[in-house]
Amino acid sequence: MRSTHPQDDADPALLADIAAGNQAAFERLYRLYETRVFQYISTLVSNSALAEEIVGDTMMAVWRGAGTFSGCSRVSTWIFGIARHKALDALRRTTRTQREVDLDGAADLVSSEDSPFDQVQRSQTESLTKQALSTLSRDHQEILRLVFYEDLPYEDIATLLSIPTNTVKTRVFYAKQQLKRHLEQLGQKESIR
């Protein structure tokens, strides 16, 4: 799994511009984070319309609170923290406990240099990975998204989830083991067909 975004060192400067009321800076930050926040929220809520609403709420909170960013973490960690709190609040309001995962936007783009065979193989791998991810617990799906797709360090994830760093390491370890086991089971079923 690869990160779905490049690390942007300009984020703190963008946030400072937003705190000063620069609407163009906010629009740029919004474009940078809209998809990432939506994909992350989708691991927490099962309703895409609700996820879109939470993205809007999150970004409005970023607009209003940009001046409160302390710089003690990455901007992405701060934004994902806001998104997580908004999503959990929405879940409490809707009292829905069932959820599905939509990781369609997290798949790597197909390279034009790949052969048709490579493209088919990548597509099959992505499909099996999505199936296997959907069998994991919400905690394990969330931790894998933050580690592999958002490329956050364990310390930032610990802060975001309000858990010790060692708990993050443990969840990642067990989530990867479960994912591997589910992938092996799905791979065996595919080879039988």
Image (cartoon, rainbow, N blue to C red):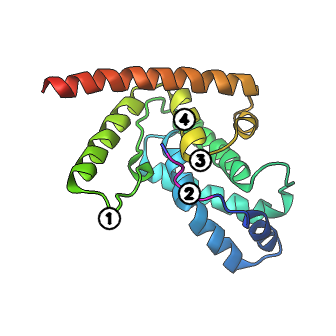
Separation of marks 4 and 3 at Cα, in angstroms:
9 Å
Q: Which residues are magenta?
A: 2-6
- Tell me the residue that label 1 is attached to: 112
Instruction: Please tell me which of labels 4 and 2 falls first in the chain.
Output: 2
| Residue 128 location, quadrant | top left
Q: Is residue 159 magenta?
A: no
Relative to 50, residue 44 above or below: above
Separation of marks 4 and 2 at Cα, in angstroms:
15 Å
* Amino acid type, residue under disc 2 in the picture: His
Task: Kindly check if marks 2 and 3 are in contact, taking CB atoms under 8 A apart as contact.
Answer: yes
Classify mark 1: helix, strand or loop: loop
Separation of marks 2 and 1 at Cα, in angstroms:
19 Å
Q: Which residue of the protein is positioned furthest toward the left in this rendering?
A: 193
Picture disc at residue 5:
2
* Amino acid type, residue under disc 1 in the picture: Ser
Residue 61 visible (yes or no): yes
* Amino acid type, residue under disc 4 in the picture: Leu
Residue 19 locus on image (x, y percent)? 81, 69
Q: Residue at x 20, y 28 (%)?
A: 190
- Tell me the residue that label 3 is attached to: 150
